[in-house]
Image (cartoon, rainbow, N blue to C red):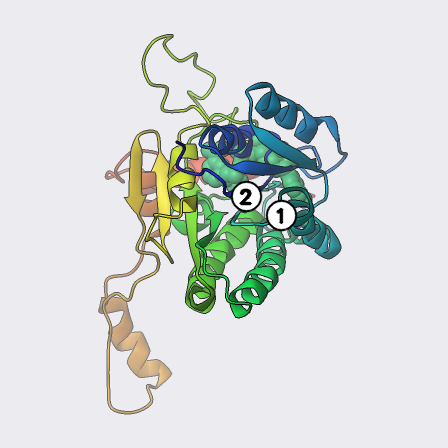
Amino acid sequence: MGHLDGRVVLITGAGRGIGREEALHFAAEGAKVVVNDPGVAIDGSGGDSGVAAAVVEEIVARGGQAVASTDSVADWDGARRMVDTALQVFGDLHVVVNNATIERNRALADLTEEEFDDVVAVKLKGTFAVTRWAARYWRERFEAGVRVDRAVVNTSSGSGLLNPLPTQASYAAGNAGVAALTIVGALELGRYGVRVNCLSPSMARTRLTLDVPGMREEPSADGFDPLHPSTSAPVAAYLASAACPLTGQVLSVRGGSVAVNHGWSRGGHVRKDGRWTVGELAEKLPAVPMDDPFGKLADALGGALGPDGRARIQEMIDALLDQEGRR
Ligand SMILES: NC(=O)c1ccc[n+]([C@@H]2O[C@H](COP(=O)([O-])OP(=O)(O)OC[C@H]3O[C@@H](n4cnc5c(N)ncnc54)[C@H](O)[C@@H]3O)[C@@H](O)[C@H]2O)c1
């Protein structure tokens, strides 16, 4: 008995990295999987239909059931076709895992309109598009009297939630948007039996992270490999399982750690009975403890912000921006 026996699951970006591991894990847990991936390069260029097909072959060779889809999540009709593929081939759709991404990192002052739009189109609009077509189908089934657990598992990133990284304005904005979509989706779709949650993987060894220091180190042959791209697959499978009660949650996964994120939260405040003037705000507001983006980045890099910490982080930001080159 698998935890996903009989569940039909559509996973976007399932040809490589984290999505591929999710597809293999879901199939091993008994799910029928639509493996969506157009097989593009990191920046979204090109395409290779063999990428999704190879994962389908792997699943079938292990005795599982899967079908390939090579549409782009950024294509509105393509998103509809993915959902239709699940219905036509497997007769239903229980779970959507929105995992696809591209990256086009560049200093904000140099980022082009096209680069920004392309990343947001895959990461944020793509998550919306696939969820929207699935939600249409789920609402229709609910209104026809069918009562069955449905689930969306979105994918965000620490870059956008906890530690926005310099040069990732588009990617971070898209990922923050995915977390917002998760909460709105959970509140709206709950009435049709749909739970909506989100994963935020971290430090998983894929083509996106190979240049992060330490990522290329070979794991020891026997023990647990905390950098392996499969670490979030069981968390995604749990969120996808019919017995899971969670909805509206964003979970950070890093190696063996699974943390519940609490998102933006109100901090200290100033208050008066009336409208503030600029002068009053200038006098009072700086006394309220402020949020610290430098501290967040230091946290993400695994170190506390010591006495020379801010200068160190600024040096790192400068190096990153210089590396991207000015245009
Ligand atoms: N690797 C990490 O440590 C890490 C950290 C934080 C968040 N994430 C998130 O995890 C998810 C997977 O990332 P990954 O590291 O496995 O990346 P990856 O590049 O290995 O895999 C992403 C896959 O998405 C596919 N894709 C790209 N554009 C698509 C489109 N328009 N439609 C459908 N598929 C498309 C690509 O072809 C690729 O196979 C992403 O959402 C990413 O933001 C990863």
Quadrant where the C terminus sits is top right
Q: Is 131 situated left or right of 260 in this image? A: right
Disc 1 on helix, strand or loop?
A: loop
Whether disc 2's CB lies below 8 Å from ligand 1 is answered no
Rendering coords of residue 85 (x, y %): 69, 46
Q: Which residue: 55% across, 20% down?
A: 62
Contact? badges 2 and 1 (CB < 8 Å)? yes
Disc 1 marks which amino acid? Gly
Quadrant where the N terminus sits is top left
Disc 2 marks which amino acid? Val
Q: Quadrant of residue 286?
A: bottom left
Q: Quadrant of residue 167?
A: top right
Q: Is 268 situated left or right of 42 in this image? A: left
Q: Nearer the viewer, residue 200 or 133?
A: 133
Q: Nearer the viewer, residue 234 or 169?
A: 234
> Disc 2 marks which residue?
8
Quadrant of the image where one finds ligand 1: top right
User: 184 above or below 71?
Assistant: below
Q: Does the image show residue 22? A: yes
User: 302 above or below 139?
Assistant: above
Rendering coords of residue 36 (x, y %): 64, 39
Rendering coords of residue 272 (x, y %): 24, 86
Q: Which mark is residue 91?
A: 1
Q: Which residue: 34% across, 57% down?
A: 263
Q: Which residue: 30% across, 30% down?
A: 256
Q: Does the image show residue 325? A: no
Q: Is 64 situated left or right of 267 in this image? A: right
Disc 2 on helix, strand or loop?
A: strand
